[in-house]
Structure formats: C-alpha cells, structure tokens
Image (tube, rainbow, N blue to C red):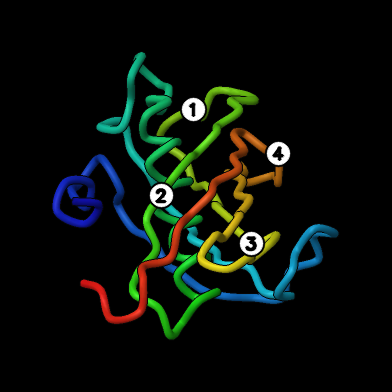
Amino acid sequence: MFNAVLYKPGAIDAHVSFQRPCAEPDNSSGIEQCMLFSIGPHVDGKVGRAHGGFNSLILDQLTGSAAFFAVPDSPPPATATLTVDYKAPISTPCVILARAWVIEVSGRKIWVRGVIEDGEGKVMASGKALFIAGRPGAL
C-alpha cells in the first residue's frame, strides 16, 4: 500500500532509505533505520500541512522496518500498538527525515521508537510502537 498509494507526483516525490549508527541513549542495537522524503501537497490534510495520518503512516512503516531487521530469522512482525505524539505541523512541500530504532526485544515482542524531523532537525512527530514477530514456520 505504501508504495502503490503514495509514490505519485505531489505526494512522495522522492525518498531514500538507509541505516546508520544511532546515538539515541535507549537504542538497543546501535543502528537506526532512516528514510529521507521529499513530500508535496497531496499528503495535506489542511492546505500546506501534512495530514496527521500521513505522519502516522511514515512512523508505522519505518518502525516496522526497524522491527523487521531486529528479528531477521522470523516472519515479518506485525504492529500491535503505535502511539504518536504530534509536536508541530509539517508544512508542505518539504523534505523530512524519519528515523527509527529498536529499544527492546523480548521474545517475539519488539519495542521501537521513531521520529520525524524537519530539515533543521526539529522533531515534528514522535512515536513508540510494539511489534509482534511472526511465529517461526507461520505464514
């Protein structure tokens, strides 16, 4: 859904994904997943502002990627909870950086934090998610 719906001119105009060392104090793996986006007005709720649901979608997608890499030998994890704190509106068009890192793994449970930052590093939204890894051998 992420790729099919949002990768259109005026929505997500471009993006790049990468991993890098993470300096967040609650990081359990030393690595964070990152996505750099160029977004346009077709993600707006109110004119000139990205819809809050778009922010949640970005955080869910990226925290899910971090959870996936935390349990590489398991089926893909599923979102159990995602709590989003909206800090400031994201003005469009713009470039944003989304980052996510694993804070704890316990059995099949994976807790992940994520943030969306503007071009100056200001946190626009933050979230905490719990993912449940698939059972080995399950589809």
Q: Is residue 131 left or right of residue 88?
A: left
Above or below, 62 against 106 in this view is: above
> In terms of sequence position, does the residue under pointer 2 or pointer 4 come before the other?
2
Q: Residue furthest left?
A: 4
Which one is closest to the eye, mark 3 or mark 1? 3
> In terms of sequence position, does the residue under pointer 2 or pointer 1 come before the other?
2
> In terms of sequence position, does the residue under pointer 3 or pointer 4 come before the other?
3
Q: Which residue is mark 1?
A: 91
> In terms of sequence position, does the residue under pointer 3 or pointer 2 come before the other?
2
* Amino acid on which the number 4 mark rests in the picture: Lys
Which secondary structure, mark 4?
Answer: loop
* Amino acid on which the number 1 mark rests in the picture: Ser
Q: What residue is shown at x 85% (from left), y 59% (from top)?
A: 25
Which is more toward the observer, 9 or 137?
Answer: 137
> Could you give the CA–CA distance between mark 3 and mark 1, rounded to whole angstroms?
25 Å
* Amino acid on which the number 3 mark rests in the picture: Trp
Q: What residue is shown at x 40% (from left), y 21% (from top)?
A: 48
Residue 94, image x and y in percent? 47, 40
Q: Which residue is mark 4?
A: 122
> Could you give the CA–CA distance between mark 2 and mark 4, rounded to whole angstroms?
26 Å
> Could you give the CA–CA distance between mark 2 and mark 1, rounded to whole angstroms?
27 Å
> Could you give the CA–CA distance between mark 3 and mark 2, rounded to whole angstroms?
15 Å
Query: Pointer 4: residues within 10 angstroms few (<14), some, or many (20+)?
Result: some
Contact between marks 3 and 1 (CB within 8 A): the answer is no
Query: Pointer 1: residues within 10 angstroms few (<14), some, or many (20+)?
Result: many
Q: What residue is shown at x 46% (from left), y 82% (from top)?
A: 72
* Amino acid on which the number 2 mark rests in the picture: Thr
Which one is closest to the eye, mark 3 or mark 2? 2
Q: Which residue is mark 2?
A: 79
Q: Which mark is residue 101?
A: 3
Which is more toward the observer, 18 or 107?
Answer: 107
> In terms of sequence position, does the residue under pointer 3 or pointer 1 come before the other?
1
